[in-house]
Image (cartoon, rainbow, N blue to C red):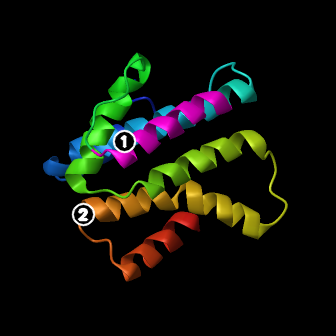
Amino acid sequence: MSIDHYENFPVASLLLPRRLRGAVTDIYRFARAADDIADEGSATDEERLAQLATFRTELHRIGAEPGTPPAPGLPPLSDIFGPLAQTIARHQLPITPFYDLLSAFEQDLTVKRYEDDPTLMDYCSRSANPVGRLMLHLFDASTPQNITESDAICTV
């Protein structure tokens, strides 16, 4: 998968410190691929959920054994999860934000309309907040106050 798939990643990555570009690329590649499963192509919702379940299984494995290579038999995912496993281990990133992102992408397939603001904000807390939290960890700035402020920016 190309990291310049769309959106603003190629430009934004130039603003990052060189030492973090690879890690941010690995996080982006994971999020972009999972989001594309939920939003792009002609697969049924059930097929998409099954593909996201594969992502969840692989996340569980690398979360339990940080830094390990992808499971055998997952060639399409090895380009995503191999580097991601190394990034998670190298930067001691929490695994929960990745699960939160997957939960939001799964919700894209199961919820078509939000009935009220609290349920929409719950979705936002899993689709936007995790990225902010991961960036805070990468920049060694993951304090309770920074997390609170980042969450407020990401969900509003």
Q: Residue furthest right?
A: 115
Q: Is residue 119 magenta?
A: no
Helix or strand or loop: what does disc 2 sit on?
loop
> Magenta residues?
49-66
The residue type indicated by label 1 comes to Ile
| Percent x, y of residue 49 | 66, 33
Q: Is residue 57 magenta?
A: yes
Viewer-side residue, 81 vs 148: 81
Q: Identify the main secondary structure in magenta.
A: helix
Camera-near label (2 vs 1) is 1
Which disc is residue 10 wearing? none
> Height in image: 154 above or below 36?
below
At horizontal 30% and vertical 32% (from top left) the residue drawn is 82
On screen, residue 142 above or below 115: below
Which label sits on residue 62?
A: 1
Quadrant in the picture for residue 27: top left
Q: Is residue 36 above or below residue 117?
A: above
Give the total of numbered labels. 2
**Residue type beneath disc 2:** Phe
Q: Is residue 25 left or right of residue 57?
A: left
Label 2 or label 1, whichever comes before in sequence order: 1
Residue 152: percent from the left, percent from the top?
Answer: 52, 73
Graded by Cα atoms within 10 Å as few (under 14), some (14 to 19) or many (20 or more), the crowding at tag 1 reads: many
Residue 155 location, quadrant: bottom right
State the image coordinates of residue 116 (x, y, percent, origin top left).
Answer: 82, 66
Within the image, what quadrant is residue 60 found in?
Answer: top left
**The disc label shown at residue 139, or none:** 2
